[in-house]
Image (spheres, rainbow, N blue to C red):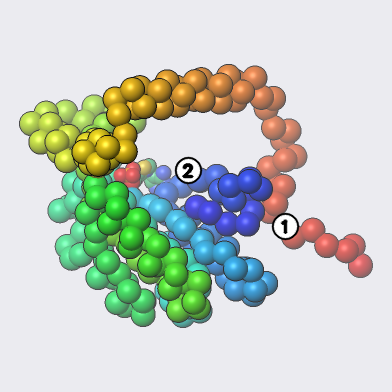
Amino acid sequence: MAGHFGDKKNHIVTGSSPVTTQVPHAAGIALAAKMKKQDFVTFVSFGEGSSNQGDFHEGCNFAGVHKLPVIFVCENNQYAISVPLHKQVAGKIADRALGYGFPGIQVDGSDVLEMYRVTKEARERAARGEGPTLIEMISYRLMPHSTSDDDMLYRTKEEVEQNRQKDGILKFKEYLMECGLWSEDQDRDLQERQKQEINEATKYADLAPYPKPEDTLLHVYAEGDDQ
Ligand SMILES: Cc1ncc(C[n+]2csc(CCOP(=O)(O)OP(=O)(O)O)c2C)c(N)n1
């Protein structure tokens, strides 16, 4: 989720562990931007499971009423841990936007360029003061939910392998190579640099001191004059 708080360079707010709390947070950040006349657009993503929680409704409804500059992206990867889509959602998630008074669009999440186009349009709409957009990106979770999840208890290897063929990263890599814009050598270099960056970040995190107990109250209350 991007906003003007948190890390100054990237404006990225740390994700929270309780799912869907980020949706009302995003609406709040977008409200602050509107009130302070700051020209940035907030972007927030969440899973299809999260879109069934109350926080999703409250955040979207508030953002719709106040025409806030926010983009809601639902990453519909077909599973909320072990629960498949058909046991969570009866209709179409993108259609829910209609009830909040803003557009909702379903996109093939493995189509990088289409995702870029739709997100850019949503950003321009928000920047013009026309309010939020809901983007439902259809995707598939190729990995287990977490290291403690045995996904073979609720889906088959065949299903995973079938979906692996549709992997958007591989499809986009092939497309760029066909256009002569990318090569296997560049790809290897990129992966090497990414590995190094992750290793350095892991080392940095391992060496970082634990926060002080009183830091839990940082940024909870507005700081102002004592009078
Ligand atoms: C409020 C809350 N309830 C339950 C959980 C446990 N939990 C962690 S991930 C998850 C499923 C989320 O599914 P989805 O929103 O589809 O996101 P995905 O993990 O597929 O990206 C649940 C229920 C949680 N973290 N927070």
- Please name the amino acid that badge 1 sits on: Tyr
Instruction: Give how far apart the Cα atoms at labels 1 and 2 are.
Output: 20 Å
Q: Which residue is mark 2?
A: 17
Report the residue at 72% width, 40% height from top: 215
Q: Give the numbered dot on residue 78.
A: none
Q: Image check: 147 left or right of 221?
A: left
User: Residue 226: horizontal and vertical position, in percent?
Assistant: 90, 62
Assign a secondary structure to mark 1.
loop
Q: Quadrant of residue 179?
A: top left
Placement of 8 over or under 72, stated as above or below: above
- Please name the amino acid that badge 2 sits on: Ser
Placement of 57 over or under 209, stated as above or below: below
Assign a secondary structure to mark 2.
loop
Placement of 36 over or under 7, stated as above or below: below
| Crowding near the residue tagged with mark 2, few <14, some 14–19, many ≥20 C-alpha atoms within 10 Å | few
Q: Give the numbered dot on residue 221.
A: 1
Q: Residue furthest front?
A: 180
**What is the tally of numbered marks visible in this picture?**
2
User: Residue 79: horizontal and vertical position, in percent?
Assistant: 23, 44
Nearest the eye: 166 or 180: 180
Q: Quadrant of residue 135?
A: bottom left
Q: Residue furthest left?
A: 158
Report the residue at 24% width, 47% height from top: 110
Q: Quadrant of the C terminus?
A: bottom right
| Cβ at disc 2 under 8 Å from ligand 1 | yes
Q: Is residue 154 visible?
A: no
Q: Image check: 180 left or right of 8?
A: left
Nearest the eye: 214 or 96: 96
Report the residue at 59% width, 51% height from top: 11
Q: Image check: 209 left or right of 72?
A: right
User: Residue 58: horizontal and vertical position, in percent?
Assistant: 44, 68
